[in-house]
Amino acid sequence: MTSRSLAGKLEEGLDQARALLDGLLVLARAQRGAIGDPARVPLEQLVHEALRIEGPEIARLGLVVEDKTTPIQLLGNETLLARMVANLVENAVRHNVAGGLVQISDDARGKMVCLAIANSGVKIEQSQLSELGEPFRRLGPERVASGNGAGLGLSIVRAIAEAHGGSLELRARPEGGLVATVLLPSPAS
């Protein structure tokens, strides 16, 4: 092994360790409910930024993205809400199939704001879904196409939603893939 390839492997390992540590810190902060002073946050803008970041992987996989978000506002910590949306979009892209679909929509439901992100992918048993919201839980190699990730993404989403007075619901799509729905209190409530 050359020193250049060894340096590359070390850098890759450090990047993975940094990502894991960052995820654990966000999870701990959200679980403590430490959202700070809430601000009005445009949900549509968070979704567009997450899609921009995932753009290269979306293109590589040839995914079709249907973004039906609207100018809905959230009330909370912008950094945590951005991380929540980014994790949902990344999850929908990472656990997809080549040529697959990502559908994103939002709406106001009375005193709640709903964000739903669906993706195509392998079939998931409804009974397995409770595991996905727990830290370090993944459904196995067929669900983890890239082999990256520590299984924190959806547990971070759940913790951030709950810290903001909301919830995360996961539903298996009969044709394969997942629908992740986050409900958060509306700023108007």
Image (spheres, helix red, strand yellow):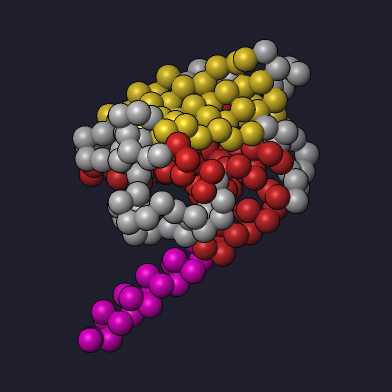
Q: Nearer the viewer, residue 118 or 86?
A: 118
State the predominant SS element of the stretch in magenta: helix
Left or right? Give the position of 71 relative to 40.
Answer: left
Q: Is residue 140 above or below residue 51?
A: below
Q: Can residue 51 be spotted in the picture?
A: no
- Asked if the stretch drawn in magenta spans residue 137, the answer is no
Residue 25: which quarter of the image? bottom right
Quadrant in the picture for residue 53: top left
Q: Residue at x 55, y 33 (%)?
A: 169
Instruction: Pick the quarter of the image with the N terminus.
Output: bottom left
Taking the spot 33% from the left edge, 80% from the top edge, the residue there is 7
* Quadrant assignment for the C terminus: top right
In the displayed orientation, state which residue is furthest to the top: 110
**Residue most extreme to the front:** 127
Residue 2 picture quarter: bottom left
Residue that appears at 58% across and 20% down: 72
> Residue 13, image x and y in percent?
41, 72
Where in the figure is residue 138, as x and y percent of width and height?
44, 53
Say whether residue 171 is left or right of residue 42: left
Q: Position of residue 23 (x, y in %)?
A: 56, 57
Q: Count the marks.
A: 0
Q: In this picture, which residue range is highlighted in magenta?
A: 1-19
Seen as rendered, the residue at the extreme right is 37
Asked if residue 171 can be seen in this view, the reply is yes
